Structure formats: structure tokens, C-alpha cells
Image: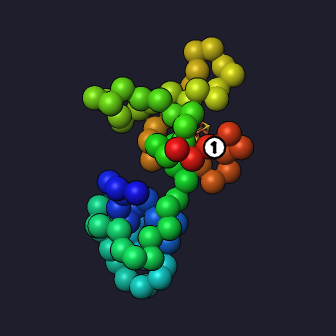
Amino acid sequence: MTNLNCRDCRDFAPIDVVKGVCHITKTTVLGDAEQCGDFSMMPKCKHCSQFTADAETVEMGVCQASTMEPKFFAFPDMVSVTCEYYEQN
Ligand code: SF4
């Protein structure tokens, strides 16, 4: 999958908005660093078929699985490991 980086990996533990620790190498890495060969994608709303967002303003989207009216906001980087409605694109 393209356009994914270290912050999208299951083995990335964030420290702050810029950097985190890689559980595999045990080193500090930038969240925006390119994915390596051990990359394992973290489920996030942006990878879910229920997530819709304006391509021009992807900072915020909508969850189509929501039963509320209006449907609730979802943001692309929201971790979805516990979401029962997650469906990977
Ligand atoms: S179904 Fe869950 S993972 Fe998918 S967009 Fe909605 S909140 Fe995010």
C-alpha cells in the first residue's frame, strides 16, 4: 500500500506528533519516515470502506457506519483496532 509511513504501522509507538519508537528496531523514528520491509498496517479510519471524506479536506471525514443523524465525524488517523464496523479498503 502506498502513501503510508511509520505512523501507520502497528509497531510504531508514538512519543509526540513528530516521532515515536519502532518496536522492531527499538530506535526512535520520525512518524513521516518511509515504511520499511517489516511494515504492518495499523487499522485506521482512513483504511476503512465506511470512511468518507472530501479529497480536498481529508483532515476530517464521516463514518458511514454511524447510526446517528447526522453521522459522526471520523478523522483519518483514528485507530480502529476496536471498531466492530471496520472494513479494510
Ligand atoms: S466504521 Fe469504524 S473504522 Fe470505519 S470509519 Fe467508522 S469509526 Fe472508523
Residue 22 percent coordinates (x, y): 43, 76
| SS label for mark 1 | loop
The residue carrying mark 1 has its beta carbon less than 8 Å from ligand 1? yes
Residue 27 visible in the current orientation: yes
Is residue 12 shown left or right of residue 43?
Answer: left
Residue 88 percent coordinates (x, y): 57, 47
In this view, 35 is above or below 28: above
Q: Which residue is mark 1?
A: 86
Residue farthest toward the top in the current orientation of the protein? 69
**Residue at image point 63% right, 43% down:** 86
Quadrant housing residue 81: bottom right
Check disc 1: other Cα within 10 Å, few if <14, some if 14-19, many if 20+: some
In this view, 35 is above or below 46: below
Q: State which image quarter holds ligand 1.
A: top right
Q: Quadrant of the N terminus?
A: bottom left
Is residue 78 shown left or right of residue 67?
Answer: left
Residue 70 percent coordinates (x, y): 58, 15
Residue 14 percent coordinates (x, y): 43, 65
**Residue at image point 46% right, 38% down:** 75
**Residue at image point 69% right, 22% down:** 67
Is residue 84 shown left or right of residue 32?
Answer: right
Give the residue type that dot 1 points to: Tyr
